[in-house]
Image (cartoon, coloured by chain):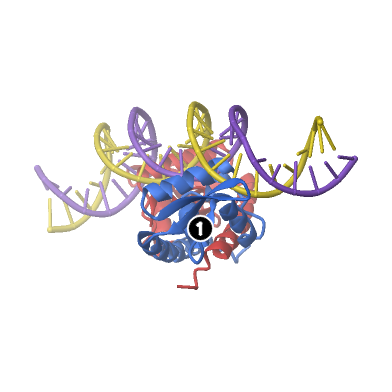
Chain colours: A blue, B red, C purple, D yellow
Amino acid sequence: MKADALRGHLDPMILAVVEHEPLHGYAIMEALLTRSGGELDLPTGTLYPALRRLERAGYLASEWSTVGGRKRRTYQLTSAGQKMLASGKQEWLTFRAVVEGVLRPGQA
Amino acid sequence: MKADALRGHLDPMILAVVEHEPLHGYAIMEALLTRSGGELDLPTGTLYPALRRLERAGYLASEWSTVGGRKRRTYQLTSAGQKMLASGKQEWLTFRAVVEGVLRPGQA
DNA sequence: TTCGATAAGTAGATTCGCTACATGTTGCCT
DNA sequence: AGGCAACATGTAGCGAATCTACTTATCGAA
């Protein structure tokens, strides 16, 4: 999968992963990897800045903790983040329809 | 639809539009608009540079003509472009599976 | 004769995912 | 004991592609 195919789609994906349970960065990476069937293996230089961006934008809130001697920053969805996620899901459906309307991927 | 959702997906869409008939830039814009149900209204500052990029990359070939006093540059798919389009369609399916695996857009 | 549609382009800004680097802990294997 | 994989977080700077805004030009209709 090409690098910048992700552009503009990563944010809702991150929000989706913490929708039902708060997770720390590393766990978010693992969740994305699992949910994508091993396809989405984000470099830390992508994920961590993205998380800070989402927090700065008010979609995530974070809290530090220490588990087994390791420091974790755990992120949870804010109510603004919930709205963002909902509209992100909707936008995805629109986007998918647009691409498939043009691409007609069923046809060889 | 957000601006950079398109990132990395525009190229195969352009190639798809000229798959069965060569078209000039303006007609490609219209075809994208039509096929996308009015959603994909590209600014010329996006489309024309993209076409030159695709030609430079060897996926499109162009030819000038004059129709009704207006100059047109008509683009057609090269054989490299055909391969690119085919793999682009395949990549789209992968990408869609990745996003939907993470997003689970059916769930509220 | 002005305006919308047709037609093609460039310059420059912005954004964000990437590579590469930096730091530190824990626990297993040899 | 030493080393290495996994766990955990982060920054600096690059590059590519889409965008806004602008330019130029023709044609037909109001």
Q: Is residue B80 left or right of residue B19?
A: right
Residue B28 rendering spot, x and y as whole percentages:
43, 52
Image: D6 above or below A102? above
The amino acid on which the numbered mark 1 sits, given as a three-letter code, is Met
Does the rendering let one see residue B101?
yes
On-image quarter of the N terminus of chain B: bottom left
Residue B14 rendering spot, x and y as whole percentages:
49, 51
Q: Is residue D6 left or right of residue B1?
A: right
On-image quarter of the C terminus of chain B: bottom left
**Residue pushed farthest bottom?**
B107
* Count of numbered circles in the view: 1
Residue B101 rendering spot, x and y as whole percentages:
58, 64
Residue A45 rendering spot, x and y as whole percentages:
55, 40
Image: A83 above or below B108? above
User: For numbered disc 1, what is the local secondary structure?
Assistant: helix
Q: Residue at x 59, y 60 (%)?
A: B98
Q: Nearer the viewer, residue B56 or D27?
A: B56
Q: Nearer the viewer, residue A14 or A20?
A: A20
Q: Nearer the viewer, residue C6 or A52?
A: A52
Q: Classify mark 1: residues with Cα within 10 Å, few (<14), some (14-19) or many (20+).
A: many
* Callout 1: chain: A
Does the rendering let one see residue B89?
no
Q: Which residue is mark 1?
A: A13
Q: Residue at x 60, y 65 (%)?
A: A107
